[in-house]
């Protein structure tokens, strides 16, 4: 009788991994008291030379969540009611305030004070932390089940809350909608056979030159990340690149690496990205896009090393494809490419569709860089691409496509990415369980941010720089928005750099690399999950490959920071 091999561990499903992370984060909220910061608007010069504003936290205003000191409030709010200038300055509703004072002080709570304009921030501005009962730190922990309307948010509702969070401009709603529209559009495009035929045509004309495709693609996508913060835009590109790279003899992991990972590497060492380095420098109070020479040299070197790392892995897979952890799931792409010989015939209709795709891709890049197009516009552009491809296929009778077939293909294409859309909502739910990323609301995440910031005071410069880098990397596991992470962390890290004797430029560099490199790994990244969904890669399998690459990136980042400290990078 054969014995079961207990050494073989079945990789958990991504859904299961995220649910365990949600449970862990929920548990942390019982242990970590909630904290918050006051916020204010800061102005900075953006990459276009225009004055922009950003809401950032004020480091010195951090406080834990405490019960109200009602004796203090009873003694001081009567005096405040008599101070009309102070009431007007803080936009307090004087009539409602007067009615509140007629009620017993022991019935007051923050919600009642908010209604008259005496918010937590207003009271903190007037009395510091004296209006709290500081003998008790409070936790902000979600219930087991509930909604905002009934019983209050419960962590078991993390999926729904995650899916409906945000707006059409970002995670999760915007990314989910983008995935479904792009999936539907490419469902039509793939059914025309144009991409398959184009892939065969390219391979037949470039035999023996396959190895040059990886560094060329890597540098191109890295440039996209460095110049305009390419991230969500990679999702539709991956739909073309995955079958192309597999047809070259590699695997879908290589395809995701030369597209998404390359773009995030470019973002990590960018000298001009308006969504990362420009915002971080503006908040840190240093000239926007300064230090570009050092960063440009880093981009050339790091991109080259990243491409070399990918080429070594890719060559190993090309020689023995079965060594790939995604060999089985990649079979669907191989089978589709080889299902019939007619796919290799490169017809006029195929060429027109590929030219239409190229035109739309150029339109997207132009729109993002020159017009500020974002998720809504990109989704619309890809819908146009799918519609044009379908109509072309109908006219040229490609695969005997009809209008009804176009509708069916759109439906099946969107369905293929529905599972990925669910992961985006799940990942966003992790952040919600931790209390959200709003610096001005009490949450465990704010306490973690404050505590880690203080941990680097008084340590040697190089260690402090690497410590900042490590912290930014870990923080990106829950907050993946580059601009959002800059707004939360740079107001703490910039003055901390002053205290430990580092330039604020180095603090920005640590933020960039921590946020950029880790975006290629974290399961909370909606863009990464979208690309993995397109490639048919489970995140847990991706992590097996990427964890080694992340170690390589961390080593490179640490070396860059040590050099920056040695030359006093300004």
Image (tube, rainbow, N blue to C red):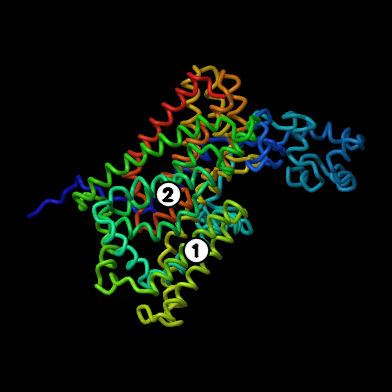
Residue at the outermost left position: 1
x%, y% of residue 117? Answer: 80, 44
- What is the quadrant of residue 172 in the picture? bottom right
Residue found 84% across the figure and 45% down from its top: 100
| Quadrant housing the C terminus | top right
Q: Which residue is mark 2?
A: 260
For this rendering, which residue is in front, 168 or 357?
Answer: 357
Say if residue 94 shows up in the picture. yes
Q: Position of residue 150 (x, y in %)?
A: 62, 58
Vertical side of 304 occupied by 371: above or below: below
Q: Which residue is mark 1?
A: 359
State whether residue 200 is above or below residue 143: below
Q: Is residue 447 left or right of residue 239?
A: right
**Callout 2: 10 Å neighbours few (<14), some, many (20+)?**
many
Sequence-wise first label, 2 or 1: 2
Relative to 547, does residue 528 appear above or below in the rendering? below
Looking at the picture, tell me which residue is in the foreground, 144 or 343.
343
**Label 2, label 1: how many angstroms apart (C-alpha)?**
21 Å
For the N terminus, which image quadrant?
bottom left
């Amino acid at each position: 009788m054969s014995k079961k091999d207990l050494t073989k561990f079945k990789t958990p499903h991504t859904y299961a991994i995220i649910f365990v992370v949600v449970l862990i984060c929920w548990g942390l909220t019982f242990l970590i008291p909630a904290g918050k910061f006051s916020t204010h608007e800061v102005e900075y010069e953006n990459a276009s030379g225009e004055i922009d504003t950003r809401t950032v936290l004020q480091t010195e205003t951090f406080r834990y969540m405490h019960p109200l000191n009602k004796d203090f409030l009873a003694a001081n709010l009567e005096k405040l009611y008599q101070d009309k200038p102070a009431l007007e300055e803080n936009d307090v509703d004087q009539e409602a305030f007067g009615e509140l004072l007629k009620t017993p002080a022991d019935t007051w709570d923050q919600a009642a004070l908010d209604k008259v304009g005496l918010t937590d921030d207003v009271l903190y501005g007037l009395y510091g932390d004296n209006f709290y009962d500081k003998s008790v730190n409070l936790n902000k922990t979600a219930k087991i089940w509930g909604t905002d309307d009934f019983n209050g948010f419960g962590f078991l509702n993390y999926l729904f809350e995650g899916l409906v969070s945000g707006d059409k401009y970002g995670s999760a709603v915007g990314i989910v909608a983008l995935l479904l529209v792009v999936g539907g559009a490419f469902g039509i495009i793939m059914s025309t056979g144009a991409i398959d035929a184009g892939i065969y045509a390219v391979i037949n004309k470039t035999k023996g030159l396959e190895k040059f495709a990886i560094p060329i693609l890597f540098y191109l996508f890295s440039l996209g990340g460095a110049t305009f913060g390419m991230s969500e835009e990679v999702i539709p590109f991956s739909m073309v690149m995955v079958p192309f790279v597999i047809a070259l003899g590699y695997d879908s992991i290589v395809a995701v690496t030369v597209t998404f990972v390359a773009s995030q590497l470019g973002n990590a060492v960018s000298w001009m990205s308006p969504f990362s380095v420009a915002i971080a420098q503006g908040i840190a109070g240093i000239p926007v896009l300064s230090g570009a020479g050092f960063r440009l040299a880093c981009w050339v070197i790091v991109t080259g090393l990243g491409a070399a790392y990918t080429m070594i892995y890719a060559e190993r897979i090309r020689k023995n494809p079965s060594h790939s952890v995604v060999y089985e799931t990649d079979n669907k792409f191989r089978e589709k490419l080889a299902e019939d010989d007619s796919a290799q015939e490169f017809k006029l209709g195929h060429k027109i569709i590929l030219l239409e795709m190229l035109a739309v891709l150029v339109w997207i890049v132009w729109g993002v860089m020159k017009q500020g197009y974002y998720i809504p516009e990109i989704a619309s552009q890809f819908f146009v691409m799918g519609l044009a491809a379908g109509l072309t296929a109908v006219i040229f009778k490609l695969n005997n496509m009809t209008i009804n077939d176009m509708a069916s293909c759109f439906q099946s294409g969107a369905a293929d990415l529905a599972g990925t859309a669910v992961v985006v909502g799940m990942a966003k739910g992790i952040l919600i369980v931790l209390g959200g990323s709003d610096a001005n609301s009490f949450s465990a995440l704010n306490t973690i941010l404050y505590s880690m910031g203080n941990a680097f005071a008084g340590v040697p410069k190089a260690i402090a720089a690497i410590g900042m880098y490590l912290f930014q990397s870990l923080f990106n596991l829950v907050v993946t928005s580059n601009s959002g992470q800059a707004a939360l962390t740079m107001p703490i890290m910039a003055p901390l750099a002053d205290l430990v004797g580092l330039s604020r430029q180095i603090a920005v560099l640590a933020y960039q690399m921590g946020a950029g490199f880790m975006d290629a790994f974290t399961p909370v990244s909606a863009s990464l999950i979208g690309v993995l969904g397109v490639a048919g890669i489970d995140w847990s399998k991706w992590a097996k490959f990427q964890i080694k690459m992340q170690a390589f990136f961390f080593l490179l980042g640490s070396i860059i920071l040590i050099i920056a400290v040695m030359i006093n990078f300004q």
